[in-house]
């Protein structure tokens, strides 16, 4: 197997691990609030992140006040708040719909790169955006009007999922501004650690308990640990290792493992399926991302590889 083929398989394996997120995260909602889950997840990852930041602490001197502002926005918005919205969406909506709506991340990332970094949009972007929006609508509401034939729970689940995708897309753009002064590993570690104070503040406002994790059963703790290190850390490392040897456009194809794995596992373990209309909506979103990916020129593609990922999710 050559390096290019190996890279493609690593991207696919990382994407498949993202697909396990719902079956690990959803059962925890029976015993914990979304904030407690996300905070515990970040604390577990911090045990790995803090040593990384300490041994490579030279990056601290490279950051100016603007860089620190971006890092806090990434940590609080794209790691803390986005993961909370993503988790809370599972409480309200169909987990498969919540997962599939995350394919909107590259669409948001490309748009924010235009607004924040003044990069040129692909020529097909404005033509494809309505297609992606139609796909998101069909995936969220089917053929129903959003305020007539859709329950409040499903409506809230979809809105929260789209907001999470937006924040993760923004995080991709903000992160690119920092990668000249930090490595990807340092940036990922920093976002996990610096999100913790924000999540602690959320927990205090909501009246939750930081000790709730100590009351979890062995089964719940197993799910919590797997959630942190499979769809979180392991998937991220495999994906970006594979992406070194793989074109972003090909990686987008390999990411089909993500929705396929998620929908199958959610159907088997959670009893949650999707309708034919919702599948059509997901296909429209994915087709948009695929066409945009193949249409990007080499310079833009090299700069937006991370936009082809579902987010850094912690």
Image: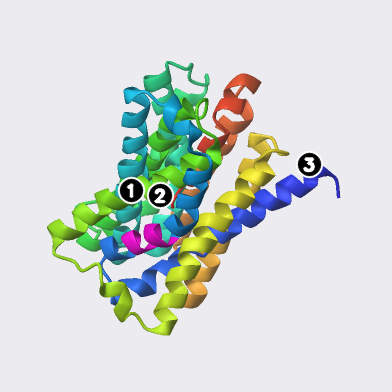
Q: Nearer the viewer, residue 117 or 100?
A: 117
Please say whether residue 42 is one of the residues in the magenta stretch. yes
The residue at 35%/55% (across/down) is: 86
Which residue ends up furthest to the right in the rendered image?
1
Q: Nearer the viewer, residue 214 or 8?
A: 214
State whether residue 124 is above or below residue 48. Answer: above
Residue behind mark 3: 4
Residue behind mark 2: 192
Q: Which residues are magenta?
A: 38-44
- Give yes or no for contact between labels 2 and 1 (Cβ–Cβ under 8 Å): yes
Q: Quadrant of residue 205?
A: bottom left
Q: Quadrant of residue 305?
A: top right
Nearer-N-terminus badge (3/2): 3
Nearer-N-terminus badge (1/3): 3
What's the CA distance linking mark 1 and mark 3? 35 Å
State whether residue 30 is above or below residue 92. Answer: below
Place of residue 284 in the rendered image (x, y in percent of width and height, measured from the top left): 49, 43
The residue at 45%/59% (across/down) is: 47
**Quick check: can you spot residue 299?**
yes
Residue 304 located left or right of residue 249? left
Place of residue 301 in the rendered image (x, y in percent of width and height, measured from the top left): 60, 27
**Quick check: can you spot residue 158?**
no
What's the CA distance linking mark 2 and mark 1? 6 Å
Check disc 3: other Cα within 10 Å, few if <14, some if 14-19, many if 20+: some
Q: Main secondary structure of the magenta part?
A: helix
Say which mark, if any, is on residue 195. Answer: 1
What's the CA distance linking mark 3 and mark 2? 30 Å
Q: Secondary structure at mark 1?
A: helix
Check disc 1: other Cα within 10 Å, few if <14, some if 14-19, many if 20+: many
Marks 1, 3: nearer the viewer: 1
């Amino acid at each position: 197997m050559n390096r290019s083929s190996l890279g493609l398989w690593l991207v696919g394996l990382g994407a498949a691990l993202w697909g396990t997120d719902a079956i690990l995260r959803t059962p925890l909602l029976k015993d914990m609030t979304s904030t407690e889950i996300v905070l515990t997840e970040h604390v577990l990852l911090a045990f790995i992140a803090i040593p990384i930041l300490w041994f490579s602490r030279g990056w601290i001197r490279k950051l100016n006040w603007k860089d620190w502002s971006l890092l806090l926005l990434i940590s609080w918005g794209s790691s803390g708040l986005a993961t909370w919205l993503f988790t809370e969406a599972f409480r309200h909506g169909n987990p498969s719909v919540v997962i599939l709506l995350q394919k909107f991340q590259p669409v948001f990332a490309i748009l924010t790169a235009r607004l924040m970094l003044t990069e040129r949009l692909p020529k097909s972007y404005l033509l494809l955006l309505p297609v992606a929006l139609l796909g998101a609508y069909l995936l969220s509401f089917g053929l129903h009007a959003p305020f007539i034939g859709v329950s409040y729970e499903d409506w809230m689940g979809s809105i929260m999922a789209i907001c999470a995708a937006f924040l993760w897309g923004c995080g991709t753009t903000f992160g690119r501004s920092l990668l000249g002064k930090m490595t990807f590993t340092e940036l990922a570690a920093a976002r996990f650690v610096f999100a913790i104070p924000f999540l602690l503040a959320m927990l205090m406002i909501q009246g939750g308990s930081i000790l709730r994790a100590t009351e979890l059963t062995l089964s719940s703790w197993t799910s919590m640990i797997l959630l942190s290190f499979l769809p979180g850390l392991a998937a991220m490392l495999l994906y970006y290792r594979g992406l070194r040897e793989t074109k972003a456009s090909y990686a987008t194809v390999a990411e089909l493992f993500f929705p396929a794995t998620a929908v199958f596992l959610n159907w088997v373990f959670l009893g949650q399926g999707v309708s034919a209309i919702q599948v059509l909506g997901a296909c429209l979103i994915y087709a948009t991302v695929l066409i945009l990916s193949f249409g990007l020129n080499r310079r833009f593609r090299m700069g937006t590889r991370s936009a082809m990922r579902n987010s850094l999710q912690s």
